[in-house]
Structure formats: C-alpha cells, structure tokens
Amino acid sequence: MNGEAALLWGVLFGSVGLGFFIYGKKQSRLVPLVCGLALMLYPYFISNVVALVLVGLALIIVPYFFRY
C-alpha cells in the first residue's frame, strides 16, 4: 500500500504544483513559481508517505506567507 499511496499523493501535489507554477509564471511571481516547481519534482525523491505529505503541505503553505 505504501507505493500506491505515495503515487497518489505525488500526483495530487504535482497537480497543485503545476497550478502554482503556471500562476507564478503568468504573474511574474518568484515564490509560487519555485514552490510549484518543487511540488512537481520532490515526489520523485521522497518515498516515505508521511514525509511526502508533510513536505507537500509545507510547500503549499509557503506562498501564502511569502508574497514576492
């Protein structure tokens, strides 16, 4: 089950990351652009589901606190 859960979480965070990336590119904002790129790439490097979810949630929250 660990593999399936990691795959589904990775797809979810990758989709959110794509949205952040497109928003950051169109609005010329660096923080959403970088967070979106990180959200799309980091699931390839983390296989632990708990760490995957925690890092993903942290990356989703970052653009709301840092608006550049």
Image (cartoon, rainbow, N blue to C red):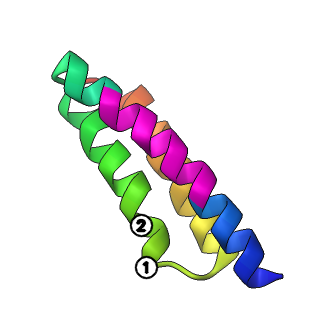
Would you say the magenta stretch is mainly helix, strand or loop? helix
Q: Residues within 10 Å of mark 2 (few under 14, many from 20)?
A: some
Image quarter (top left, top right, bottom left or bottom right) of the N terminus? bottom right
Q: CA distance from mark 2 to mark 1?
A: 5 Å
**Residue sitting at the far top:** 27
The location of residue 17, given as percent across then percent down, is 44, 44
53 lies above or below 14: below
Residue under the point 52% across and 44% down: 15
Kindly identify which residue carries mark 2. 42
50, 13: nearer the viewer: 13
Tell me the tag on residue 45. 1
In contact (CB < 8 Å): disc 2 and disc 1: yes
Q: Which residues are magenta?
A: 11-22
Left or right for 35, reference 45: left
Residue in front for this viewpoint, 34 or 11: 11
Residue 37 position, x and y percent, is 31, 50
- Is residue 1 one of those drawn in magenta? no
Q: Amino acid at mark 1?
A: Phe
In the image, what residue type sits under mark 2?
Tyr
Q: Position of residue 48 (x, y in %)?
A: 63, 81
